């Protein structure tokens, strides 16, 4: 687990400039390495890279797949699982990279909201109006 976390942490440091010069391409590289090794948090972080075009060309399809995998598998410590579920719900709601599906959006917003994520609760309220 240490090597997986180390790769993801290295990616985080490059993304934020923590202890080093910020370098989005290196951040992407290290997140991708950790995700390829099965690190769920890195999969989520890699999804963020793809959806925001940070260190890589924007790709909603790849972002969706990574968010879906991290949301379904869950993080070992539940660190960020509710945020991955929220982002997956957003993609279903907006139809970014996938076919728009409000029922699936509500499903994933519910999972996220049940873990206390306020943004998911707010979006559920908005959709139920």
Image (cartoon, helix red, strand yellow):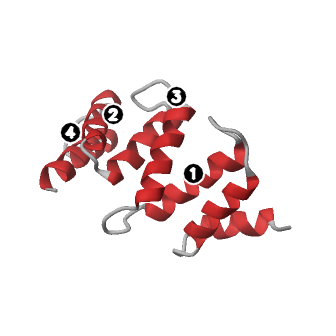
Q: Is residue 83 left or right of residue 79?
A: right
For numbered disc 3, what is the local secondary structure?
loop
For numbered disc 1, what is the local secondary structure?
helix
Residue 52 visible in the displayed image: no
Determine crowd level at label 1: few under 14, some 14-19, many 20+ residues with C-alpha closer than 10 A. Answer: many
Mark 1 and mark 4 lie on one chain; the one further toward the N terminus is: 4
* Number of the label disc, if any, that sits on residue 58: 3
**Residue located farthest toward the top when viewing the structure as drawn:** 57
Is label 3 in contact with label 2 (beta carbons under 8 Å)? Answer: no
Is label 1 in contact with label 4 (beta carbons under 8 Å)? Answer: no
Tell me the residue that label 4 is attached to. Answer: 20
Mark 3 and mark 1 lie on one chain; the one further toward the N terminus is: 3
Residue 74, picture quadrant: bottom left
Determine crowd level at label 4: few under 14, some 14-19, many 20+ residues with C-alpha closer than 10 A. Answer: few
Q: Which quarter shows the C terminus?
A: bottom right
Is label 3 in contact with label 1 (beta carbons under 8 Å)? Answer: no
Mark 1 and mark 2 lie on one chain; the one further toward the N terminus is: 2
Quote the CA–CA distance across marks 3 and 4.
25 Å
What is the x, y in percent for residue 51? 52, 37
Of the two numbered discs 1 and 4 in the rendering, the one whose residue sits closer to the viewer? 1
Determine crowd level at label 2: few under 14, some 14-19, many 20+ residues with C-alpha closer than 10 A. Answer: many
Quote the CA–CA distance across marks 3 and 2.
12 Å
Determine crowd level at label 3: few under 14, some 14-19, many 20+ residues with C-alpha closer than 10 A. Answer: some
Of the two numbered discs 3 and 4 in the rendering, the one whose residue sits closer to the viewer? 3
| Above or below: residue 107 compared with residue 55 | below
| Residue at image point 73% right, 49% down | 101
- Front residue of 8/89: it is 89
- Front residue of 46/11: it is 46
For numbered disc 4, what is the local secondary structure?
loop
Residue 44 visible in the displayed image: yes
């Amino acid at each position: 687990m240490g090597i997986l976390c180390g790769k993801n942490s290295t990616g985080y440091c490059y993304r934020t400039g923590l202890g080093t010069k910020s370098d989005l391409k290196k951040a992407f590289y290290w997140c991708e390495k950790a995700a390829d090794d099965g690190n769920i948090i890195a999969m989520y972080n890699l999804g963020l890279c793809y959806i925001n075009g940070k260190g890589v060309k924007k790709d909603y399809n790849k972002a969706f797949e990574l968010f879906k995998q991290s949301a379904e598998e869950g993080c070992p410590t539940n660190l960020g699982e509710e945020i991955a579920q929220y982002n997956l719900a957003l993609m279903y709601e907006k139809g970014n990279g996938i076919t728009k599906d409000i029922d699936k959006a509500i499903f994933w917003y519910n999972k996220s909201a049940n873990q206390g994520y306020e943004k998911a609760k707010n979006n559920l309220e908005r959709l139920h109006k």
